Structures are given as structure tokens and as C-alpha cells.
Amino acid sequence: MKRKPAAFLDRDGVINYDYGYIHKYKDFKLRPGVIRGLRYLKKNKFKIFIVTNQSGIARGFFTEKDLKLLHKKFRKDLLIKKIKIDEIKYSPYHPKGIIKKFAKNHKTRKPENLMIKQLLKKWPIDIKKSFMIGDRLSDKQCAKKSKLFFEFTKGNFYFQVKKILTKI
């Protein structure tokens, strides 16, 4: 099976504006150039993965069901625009959580890289042609552990993605 390049994208602060613990679709506002950038990645045969820490679940601000509903609506809206997100991975854990089963450190929680390892195991990815965009140091550390080219998010997602594709 031919290995494909992939974009590993943090969600809050990269795909959408980060207003803190976003879990309702009405609060999910896309950042500039996201639709055009995702389209550009698909046109260039990239797999698109979202890898996101969602400690709001551990902290009791929202449930996994809330998060899954938001992701379902987001993916549906993207499909209407002919954009397919290949997979969304999230880590509901946080050591200071109040929901017992999620109140711990976990290898899926960035800066650890288990979410990426799981995706690499499941999908035929060409890591040398892949990259990650994030907005926090934990994203950069996760990318480094995964041997992924990394950039912090910049103003316009489309222009950033276009530039990254000339570098990798």
C-alpha cells in the first residue's frame, strides 16, 4: 500500500478560534483560510488528522458525547464542501480533572504522542512528507517525538499550509 503524506492538526487555535473549552457548534468559529487550506491539502493527496487535547471532559465542563456531536457536525459541514477529515483523535485526560476516569496523565495527552502513534499504526503515512501545526509548546514537543515537521499556527491557514508544502 502506498504511503501518503499527512497533516496532523491541533484543533483549538489552529482549525478554530480558541475561546476555551469549545464544545458547542455555535461557538466553533473557523480561523482564516481553514476551508481553502484543507481543500488544498486534499488536492495534494494529504490525509488530514486532527489531534486535540480536550481536558474540558476531565474537568467536567462538557462530556465526550458533547465533543463527538460537535465533531460530527463539523465533519458533516466539511463533507458538504467536499472536504474529508480522515480521523479526529482527542485526549479527554487531565491530571487535575474532576471526572475520576479521566483525572490522570495519559500517553494520548500532548506533549506525549500516543494519538499520533495510533494514527501511524492505522494509516499508511509517509512521515517524511508529513507535518504538524499547533499553537502550544506541547504540540511542538509531540511533533518532535513523532519526528514530524512542525510549525506554530500563523495568521492564514491556507497560506501557511501552502508554504509548508514547499518545505517538506
Image (cartoon, helix red, strand yellow):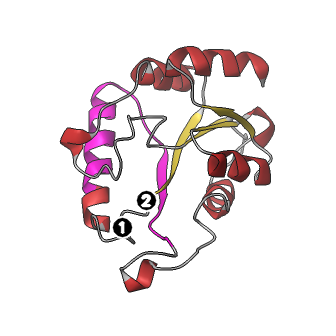
Q: Kindly state the secondary structure of the residue where label 2 is placed.
A: loop
Q: Along the horizontal axis of the image, is 108 left or right of 33?
A: right
Q: Quadrant of residue 64?
A: bottom left
Residue 17 in the image, given as x and y percentages of width and height: 38, 34
Image point 30% across, 32% down: which residue?
Answer: 29
Residue 78 in the image, given as x and y percentages of width and height: 33, 32
Identity of the amino acid at label 1? Ile
List the single residue furthest toward the bottom: 100
Residue nearest the observer in this picture, 4 or 150: 150
Task: Quickly name the residue at label 2.
Answer: 54
Q: Quadrant of residue 164?
A: top right
Location of residue 117 with respect to 93 vertically, above or below: above
Q: Quarter holding the C terminus?
A: top right
Location of residue 123 with respect to 113 vertically, above or below: above
Q: Quarter holding the N terminus?
A: top right
Identity of the amino acid at label 2? Gln
Quick check: is 111 in the magenta stretch? no
Q: Do tag 1 and tag 2 residues touch (Cβ < 8 Å)?
A: yes
- Magenta part of the chain: 69-94
Q: Residues within 10 Å of mark 2 (few under 14, many from 20)?
A: many
Q: Which mark is residue 57?
A: 1
